[in-house]
Image (tube, helix red, strand yellow):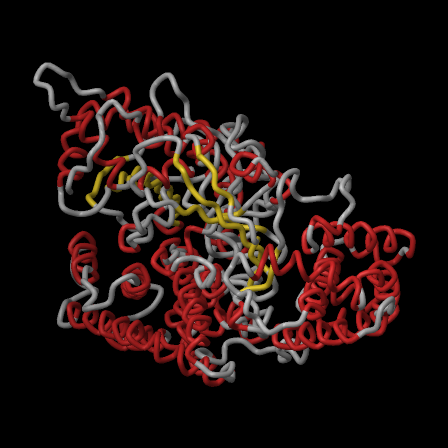
Amino acid sequence: MDAQPGTTSEALFSGLSLADPPAAPASPEAMPEAGLNSPFPARFISEAFAPGAGEAATFFAELEDEDFVDSLEQLINDAAAHQLADQRNWSSLPAEADSRASLEDWIEPVATEAERALDGFAERLAGADLYGMPAQEFEQLLEAAGNQAPHGLSGYEDFLGGLLRAGKKLVGGAVSLVKKGIAAVGKVLPVNLLLGKLKGLVRPLLRRVISAAMNRLPASVRPLARKLAAKLGVSEAEAEDHASAEGLAEVFGLEVASLLYAPEAEEELGENFFEPTPYESTDSLAALETARARFTERLAALPDGSTPAAEIEQFLPAVMAVQPLIKLGISIIGRQRVVKFVADILANLAKGLIGEGPAKLLATPVADLGLKVFGFETEADSDRMRAAEAVASTVEGTALRLMELPEATFEDQLQLASAVQEAFVEAAAAYLPDRVLHQELPERETAGEGGVWILMPRTAKPRYRFRKYTRVFAVPITRQAARAIRWSDGGTLEGHLLDRGVRRWPLEAEVDLYEAIPGTQFGHFTQDESTDEALEADSSEFQLLTPEIAGLLLREPALGRPGAGRGLPGPAGPGAHAPGAGVMASSGLGAAGLGRPRPQVGRRYFRIRSTALNRINRARRLARRLHVVMEPSKRRLRVQLRLSERQAQQVLALLQPSSPSARRDLPSVLAALRGLYEARLPLILASRLVRHQLAKDAAEASAPVDALLKALAASFSKFLSQRSAQLAAAVAEPAHGVTITATFHDVTRDKLGGAVQPPDVSVHAGWKSSAL
């Protein structure tokens, strides 16, 4: 590793010292598992630790791989960005088939390299007596066979690594079945055939990645998936979002497990794993795009003072169709009646914005604040079209806000009328210029100079993929504010900025704001045509903008939106260290969740730009800094801390001070290591213990979690006291960063009820995967 400049007196990692405890999250809602959960539903995984659990359930649980899910998320975002960028090369918007063909060409090198890697893995195992060799020798062989460098493919090493890890587990599972006497050698497919079938799952998986990026995956798993889960002896798959990375990983895990435990289902798997229902077979997103464009045109054509009830009534169903949770409720109480009721109210609220006169009042500030700011002042749209787009955004925003309401609201006319009015005012405050709003309107989003939210990219019209705020905030970011803001990798904004080269505070930066609309992927944000292409963004830079973060960064909290659910970073604050705190307040102990959820409609996101920031090297980007993995078959729990290169070099400076008279500062190293896990690990452990049926609930998990944390701290202390030279040697190796792994053995409900044995601690150069 190459040492980076900086003083050794700089506080470790995120500005921590023994007298400066790590920042903690402000509330349970702001401190979810944030990318540290399992990719599989609890009802899958819990069966693996349950008494009498089947071999298939146990094997399926061990296929969980956080790094692989992160790699799928990256592929989805890159594919989404590629599709949006590719549209610029067409004189007119391409057909879906053309877009898919372009994406298939783009992803072909990934497929080819993945197949080559699995072929190489199989070749390295050929000729070995896998069923007869000692266990330790077998593990070493698998490890060596799986260590392959990609040939000319950069940026997708984690995806290839995930496939190879699945291959290791598949081979290990086959050998385990034979050695346990559960299956005879003749009844288990030869290893080369098993790996060949695994290779056959790669292209269907990548086709699903493309479909997810294009928003063309259905919202539910087809009945065949349920049948397959039943054959494997695990519960029905019910991922919250099957078009997300964890949803794709869940399906892939089912397929891999079936190769061993349900080989007769092989012909039913592959590309056609999803079966859309009649409703889902309709492209609701494309329908919304068409309806939005038609609605805008009709609004622009209406005479002054018109009441656009009919136009709104025709538009609302397209908006509601992209929010599946409300479809059932509306169908029960009479969808058309509700649509007409809402449309009539919205038409009366919006009629003052229709016509030539109102259009001039709306179009000028929209053009000045939006199109001219972003360099689109030459757009051919008339004033009436620009004004109509702002009104259409207001109506759409109102409808989407209504979709978040409980079903009971739609059954009471007074409640619904009140909700429509409130939602309209909030949407108007967001999408209409400040100068047309009441000066004292409490829903205004900014106290000072405001902007407007406009649909982007403009060159993709009408296939818009996000909104951008026209005002770019030039702000100084203090170290204290950066330390208080959680980042999606499990760290803080401070750590993110330090890893990107910031050495002086405050950081003078510009902050861009974005809003998700139906169909938004993080990769779409990277195609912001209003920013300098030389500062090309990485999808990991876009972070959730909560009211708390908006207040800290921008001094405008109303620009943020609450971040409900897992994986959504929030501001740091007191109260996150208590074991089990906030576990029940998250999306549920038993719910699946991994990494960032896809951008949620109406949520806001921010990106920080500065000339002081180094560009992100994707090969050296940490998707997560803390990993927790439970291995049911081995009754083993592993906790991994991943240190960036900067953090590792700071550790080395404390372990090997430059001054001959200076002593190693082990207390500061230990304090910094604890700072990496103390805020988040209690919540993660409590959730894992409950999900794996090692504790009944968060309250019962509290004592075992405390015991695990004490044992972990004691083991880290012992490791640094006795073997700190190993850590220093790992830092000195060429690999980027360092991984410290603590492995707990014999993790059972009975053992957790007593004294917890200290974990074994090991250190590796580079970022070792948690799912080996």
Q: Is residue 194 above or below residue 468?
A: below
Q: In this view, does 662 lie above or below 403?
A: above
Q: Quadrant of residue 269?
A: bottom left
Tell me, yes or no, if residue 665 can be seen here. yes
Q: Is residue 559 left or right of residue 764?
A: right
The extreme left residue here reads: 660
Viewer-closest of 29 and 97 = 97
Q: Is residue 454 left or right of residue 161?
A: right
What residue is rendered at 88% in x and 61% in y? 348
Q: Is residue 153 left or right of residue 453?
A: left
What residue is rendered at 30% in x and 63% in y? 156
Viewer-closest of 348 and 658 = 348
Tell me, yes or no, if residue 189 can be seen here. no
The percent position of residue 462, horizontal first and vertical second, equals 59, 74
Number of numbered tags placed on the structure image: 0
The percent position of residue 374, horizontal first and vertical second, equals 51, 59
Q: Is residue 440 left or right of residue 278?
A: right
Viewer-closest of 657 and 456 = 456
Q: In which quarter of the image is residue 638?
A: top left
The percent position of residue 308, horizontal first and vertical second, equals 84, 70
The extreme top residue here reads: 661
Position of the N terminus by quadrant: top left
The percent position of residue 535, horizontal first and vertical second, equals 36, 55
What residue is rendered at 32% in x and 39% in y? 641
Q: In this view, does 252 lie above or below 418?
A: below
What residue is rendered at 68% in x and 56% in y? 431
Viewer-closest of 41 and 182 = 41
